Amino acid sequence: MLSFIEKRLRNTSRQGLVILLFLIITLSLGGGGLLIGFWLGSNSRNKTDTGQIKIGIVDSGCDTSQSTQVKVYEAFTNRTYFYSPSDNYTYDFLNHGSFVCEIIIQETSNQLIYSAKVASLFGQITFAGLYGAIKWLVEIVGVDIVNLSLGALPTQSPRLVDVFRNYTEHYGTIFVFSTGNDANTQLSSIGKGQWPALLPWTVGVGASKSNPFIFASYSDWGRTLYGSYVADFTADGYFALSYNNAKEGTSFAVPRVTAMLANLMQAFKTRGLAITPSTIQTFAVLMSTGYSTHHFDQRLGWGTPVFPDKVTLDNIISIYKHRDTQFIYGTNETERITRFLGENFTISWKVTQNLLADSIQSLPDISGNGSVMSQLRYKDSGNWGKILQMRVEIPKNTTLGNYTNTIRMPGGSHLDYTYVVNGSYTKKVLIDNSLSVNGYNHQFGQLLFLNMKLRSDNILPEFTFTKSNLSKYSDVVLLEPYSADFTKEEGFFMNATANDAQRYFDFLKAGGKLVTLLGEENQLPKEFLRPLLEPLGLNASYNLPSITDNKIVIVNTFANFDFSKGTRGVYGNGVALNITNSTMVTPFATYLDSYTDLAGIHSRKIVFGGNGTFGLGTFYVYSGYVGLTNPRIDPAQGDSYKLFLKIILK
């Protein structure tokens, strides 16, 4: 392949996700009913069986020089999928997908490869294009496995989740995705993994450094919003093009795992064995570097799966064909989040099973001084396997200290999960992310800092991504109300609809307190906030200047409210606010901004935060909260958390 490599020489570094110049977030129901039609159509895939495994590559396309190995090139970058300008060029123009294709070509044999181009000539990707490609690969082509080395915004909503869950359950498709390249090595766990790798029914792949147990510092890892680990496997993220010319990133680790899984599927097919995502992943664990050392790592997962020679593979299949083999994706762990007396919480782990045998469905054994407060249950994940959930309910009269649960799987593997009970909480607050599309805004991810800080002040935060019963709480913090509903006219994520917003108005009328954090997003169309803000006497006027490494907006003009006394300055980011009804809302923080137009330079005072009453309740709108959540910005330097805490405690 020397001519291909020579043709593609380009000095870059760590290219896992960086080809996405911008992402238009579209969830169109056009293009064949992209979301609903995904799984409501026939469950029968393309039955043309050549005996070969079909691999789908969703990327920026494969190269023209790879046409002898790629069976079909297809582009989803035209106006049908909301690309502008429309791009029907089917081959790679960005020097990314070609390298992914090359790794799969080099590390598989006699497989059928299908290229679905979703990144345009300018690096644009729409969700409509992404889902259109997956729909084509799964429903029309009937691929067995899909490689997606492109990151997306770490988005999360029930509609997005259903796409991959249903394709896995109904079609048995295996999805292999990048965890992302945005890790912060200063934190022991960031939990930020990119969507959709953070979903429990996908294979999340991180990057290692040549030796399979040397972690690549840029590779995302940690617990997902489901409580399970984002990285299932890792592989070498280094891809050499020529002497002194290479690329590095999780993008190039993913196709190595995809290739190994495809080879394993091919071996199963030639032996007449049934192929399911759970079976393939179980056997991948058996062949991984982590299993060989009896070690799962929260950064590396099971390490790198290595395809064995024929004799070894036959021996492994023979040994495990009639054995109930379960693997828990977890490790001995002491939870960083301290717990309260009277608190209930759930932690999760992925579990795969050897479905070649009649698997025993019994739960693992649980022991330890915390077991009397704990209950295990399986949550079925269809063809993938199971999610093992441990529900812990801490009585209010429990002795303070450390509690450890030992979970033993059939076959002898086990892990210890330790947590600390450290006192009582004085207040409970619902952190409501049900209208957000930010997949790492959860208690183990970007909001880990906020979670731990609130707990240090004896406040119990409860997190939700679903519509909870608000009447159970006196305080609700509504995060980034930008829902995933779509209209063809707009083509972007919308905020809460009027019906969604009514839940919060009813909560306020009944006497509740609502703190709305509008978040950090600077590109969100501001008119989508109207159903939520206008009834409160506010609207989103324009964007605050972005927070960058070189420019941080500090808001330091506060009204004389008790909760703002002593506040020197808070970080500001996101949309600015205007007051439309001065009898309903009062600004508690303002920002002096200057702008230039044809008439010259002007100054204006914009609202960063406001509060008021609605019915029997009170509301606070806090526009921008990066100081609360961004681990790279120390909130102690400002007063973002102190102001937020005073609002919560008021």
Image (spheres, helix red, strand yellow):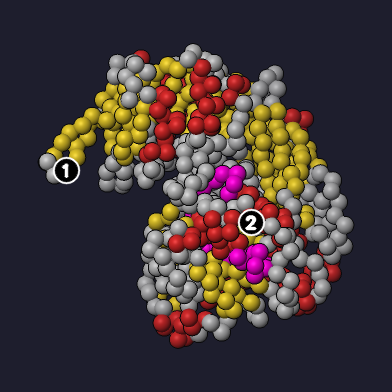
Q: Which residue is mark 2?
A: 38
- Residue at the spot 61% in from the left edge and 66% down from the top edge: 137
- The part of the image, by quadrant, that contains residue 300 is bottom right
- Residue at the spot 32% in from the left edge and 25% down from the top edge: 579
- Residue 42 shows in this picture: yes
Vertical placement of 327 versus 458: above or below? below
Would you say 70 lies left or right of 547 here?
A: right
- The magenta span reads 136-160
Q: Position of residue 225 (x, y in %)?
A: 58, 42
- Residue 260 shows in this picture: no
- The part of the image, by quadrant, that contains residue 407 is top right
- The amino acid pointed to by label 1 is Asp
* Of 467 and 417, the residue lying toward us: 467
Which image quadrant: the C terminus? top left
Would you say 500 lies left or right of 303 here?
A: left
Kindly check if marks 2 and 1 are in contact, taking CB atoms under 8 A apart as contact.
no
* Of 195 and 483, the residue lying toward us: 483
- Residue at the spot 54% in from the left edge and 39% down from the top edge: 442
